[in-house]
Image (tube, rainbow, N blue to C red):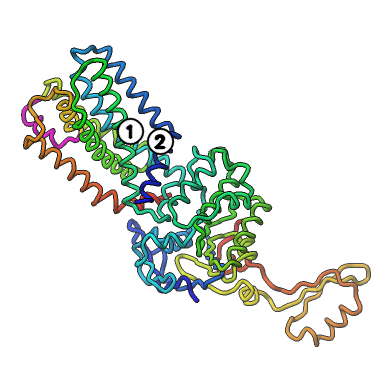
Amino acid sequence: MLNSLTLLKSEMKRLVKYKILTISLAVSVLWMAMLYLIGRENAAGFVGLFIALDASVMSIIMLGASLFFEREENTLKPLLVTPVSVAQIIGVKVLSSIYVALQSAVLVSLFVRFVMDIEVQFVALILLVALIATVHSMIGFFLAMTAKDFTGLLVNMILYTFIFAIPSLLVTLDVISGWVETLLWISPIQDALVYMNMVFGVEETLTFGSIEFILSTLYLALLSGVLYGTFIHPNYPGAAVKE
Amino acid sequence: MAVFEINDLKYSYKKNPNPVIKGIHFSIQKGEIFGLLGPSGAGKSTTQKILTKLLPEYEGSITFQGKELKSYGADFYERIGVGFELPVHFNKLTGLENMQFFQNLYQTKAPIEPLLEKVGLLEDKDKLVGEYSKGMKMRLNFVRALLNEPEFLFLDEVTNGLDPKNARIIKDMIAAFRADGGTVLLTTHLMGDVEALCDRVAFIKAGEIIESNTPKELKIKYGERVVDVEYVKDKTVQKEQFDLTGIGENEAFVDLIKTHEIRTIHSGETTLEDIFIQITGDAYVE
């Protein structure tokens, strides 16, 4: 426990030193400026999209880039010969990813709540962004650990985004519907989008406590657990010592 | 007493069925510096990774302090220090911040600044590691290995990239570590380090240990039992070789050193460099 806190403190310090928090803050400011320009009437429809993308795609980028830069600096291997477990190392990376996603989500939500007078369910926002960031951190680990190099990671990320984000966008624009829309529930990006629309009162078909909501939440939790248990935890030491 | 006892150790990487370690046996005694030597790709680093539990799926038996290595948890890492071959630091943190980061993960904590002072990095402790030279990073690597006051040190090419003065400082610190009761596994191909530090060495080639002994015994075993004498005769330097056995009773030798100006006398003892080439069959590159 003490080691987890030490690791977390150090990870946060690294986020500051490597300017990850500053970049995340700059992206939040960009979202806020765009929402302001879109105007109050349409902003509610977009704020969920921005936060969903931030918590999902940004979590993947952050995890993947962090793993590659640390491998380049050879700092993954020495941690494995300290009294810190692999679970602690992975857990702390996921926590820091959640922190970055929450910082952005809360800032943008405070902006739309108090500047643009849009209703926000803050407790749901925090819990659901944490879930979205967790599952996408696991996906980030998976994509980074299966990539040979940084270019490979970028290709993996583009493929993931293409496969899962484009259909969501097409459904949002009513270009496709029916069974494809139903099938999209397996897409974590689609789930993130629907969750955020609920948080900002845009989604009307799904409500908290509904069976669909519970099933989708269980699905994301299970997906995180399966990725962690079957791939990330067993393969992390091998990936970390690879030179 | 053996700190590490390795018996019939075998290892194959998942993607390559051919074993890289082929049933090796050796032990490391408490208070000694044990050198594991061999050409690139011989299995030195793999052996070290296995002993530091980075590669857990090995065959055979390894005991640490009498207990199976596989039975150790995080407490194993409280007792060992690892000095890697390449720099292992966060470039955007200072030298001191890097050391504090790693040290905070251990229960036992050695004072950091005296260690930095010993390796000549105290004045640069607040510089970003990204601004350090390779030699400075290697010295910081060594300090990192000592942060938890370990009883056993794994050192991989520890003086790689250091100038002779800083290499000497590190070697003196390793010798002091041994003098304080510490044990060291030194993995290297730098025979100068081996000559200066190792109590015993093992040569590994293609995953097998093909020779193991003290450096002195190896030199005797692989050297020639002869004495080469250079002396002055008729204003020119001449050479003569004598059998080392019974040299005290060798009248020609005794007469030569009595009646001529001797320039040099050398026994036919070989160097570890020559032994390395002879044993491994590979050219030695320093």
**Element type where label 1 sits in the image:** helix
Residue drawn at (23%, 40%) of the image: A135
Residue drawn at (28%, 29%) of the image: A54
User: Magenta span has B121?
Assistant: no
> Residue B175 or A182: which is nearer the viewer?
B175
Query: Residue A50 in the image: x percent, y percent?
Result: 25, 24
Residue A199 horizontal side relative to residue B101, left or right: left
Q: Chain of mark 2?
A: A
> Residue B142 or A114: which is nearer the viewer?
A114
Which numbered disc, 1 or 2, marks the residue that appears first in the sequence?
A: 2
Q: Which residue is mark 2?
A: A15
Dot 2: few (<14), some (14–19), or many (≥20) neighbours within 10 Å?
some
Dot 1: few (<14), some (14–19), or many (≥20) neighbours within 10 Å?
many
Stretch in magenta: A177-188
Residue drawn at (20%, 34%) of the image: A128
Q: Distance between the Cα atoms at labels 1 and 2?
A: 9 Å
User: Magenta span has A183?
Assistant: yes
Query: Residue B107 in the image: x percent, y percent?
Result: 44, 56
Residue B89 drawn above or below residue A202:
below
Query: Residue A5 in the image: x percent, y percent?
Result: 37, 46
Q: Which residue is mark 1?
A: A100
What kind of residue is marked 2? Leu
Tell me the chief SS of the magenta region.
Answer: helix
Quarter location, residue B201: bottom right
